[in-house]
Amino acid sequence: MREKTIHYKDINVFITCSLCNGYLIDAATIPECLHTFCKTCIAAYLDNDEEDNTRCPKCDSVIDHVNPWRVLVFDRTLQSIAYKLVPHLYKEEIERQIAYYKERDLPYPPALVEKLQEKRDEEEQQIIPSNSDLHIYDDQVAICIETRVKDLQPLPRKFIICSSNATVTHLKKLLAKMIFEDPCQYRKIDIYLDEQILGKDHTMRFISLTKWRHKMPPICFTYNVSSD
C-alpha cells in the first residue's frame, strides 16, 4: 500500500481565515454555509456597524438578522487539525495571548487558563525517566504472523507479545528489521488480516476489538513483500 504525499498548498484553504489570510485561531464556523474564520476576525466583522454584518463575509449567505453571534459554532475539531498540521502555531498563539494580558496587567481569561493547564499536563507527560519502560502499563496483545507465499523465508519467530498501542506500521518495521535488517524498508511490506490489507495506523487494540472480537488469541496476521 503506497503512501500519498499531501502538500501544504493543497490543504491551506481549509485551515486559513479569509478575513486575515492567516491560519485559523479559535475557529468559528457559520452553520448556514460552513465557512470558518478566526474568532477575533469574525467578531470584528460582526461588530462593525458600517458593514452589513448579518451576512457571511465570504459567500454573502444570511447569518442571522437579529443576533449573528447566536448561531456561530466554535469548531474545536478543525482548530485541533490546524494546530497539528502547522508546527509551532499553538505555542506561538499561547505566547501571544500571554504577552497581550501581561502588557495590559489583565487577568488571564478562563479559556487561556485552560490552555495553559493543558500545555503543562502535556509537558509533564513528556518527562519520562531514562530507565523507564514506555509501555510497561499497556495492555498486551498476542499476535501470530506468517508469510502469505511459500517462497519467502520463514521468520525467526512468528509469535509476538506486544503493546496494544502498537500500530500496523510498528509491526511492518519489525518485519523489515527481521527480513531486510533495515526498518526503513517497511514500505515494501503489506500486512493482511482475513485477506484484507490493514491500514498503517490501525492499533492492535483497535484490531482486537473490531476485526478479531469474537476469536481467540493470538491475532493471526499474514504478510507479503512487494517486488519493487
Image (cartoon, rainbow, N blue to C red):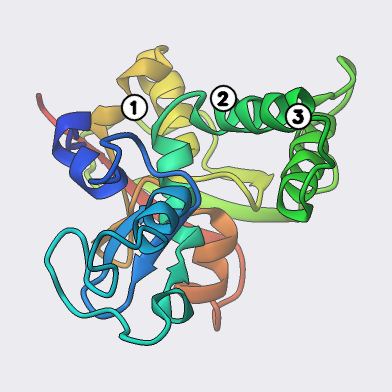
The residue pinned by badge 3 equals 104
Q: Position of residue 201 (x, y in %)?
A: 42, 48
Relative side of 20 to 125, left or right: left
Q: Secondary structure at mark 2?
A: helix
- Amino acid type of the residue that numbered disc 2 sits on in the rendered structure: Glu
Q: Looking at the image, is mark 2 or mark 1 earlier in the sequence?
A: 2
Q: Secondary structure at mark 3?
A: loop
Q: Residues within 10 Å of mark 3 (few under 14, many from 20)?
A: few
Residue at image location 55% in from the left, 35% down from the top? 157
- Amino acid type of the residue that numbered disc 1 sits on in the rendered structure: Tyr
Foreground residue, 95 or 177?
A: 95
Residue at image location 51% in from the left, 28% down from the top? 156
Mark linked to residue 92:
2
Q: Position of residue 12 (x, y in %)?
A: 22, 38
Q: Position of residue 32 (x, y in %)?
A: 25, 80
Tag in front: 1 or 3: 3
Q: Residues within 10 Å of mark 1 (few under 14, many from 20)?
A: many
Q: Residues within 10 Å of mark 2 (few under 14, many from 20)?
A: few
The residue pinned by badge 1 equals 186
- Amino acid type of the residue that numbered disc 3 sits on in the rendered structure: Arg
Instruction: Decide if residue 46 is in sight here.
Output: yes
Distance (Cα) linking label 2 and label 3: 19 Å
Residue at image location 90% in from the left, 20% down from the top? 129
In the displayed orientation, state which residue is furthest to the bottom: 66
Residue 189 lies in quadrant:
top left
Residue at image location 68% in from the left, 46% down from the top? 163
Q: Look at the numbered discs 2 and 3 and tell me whether their residues touch, using CB distance below 8 Å.
A: no
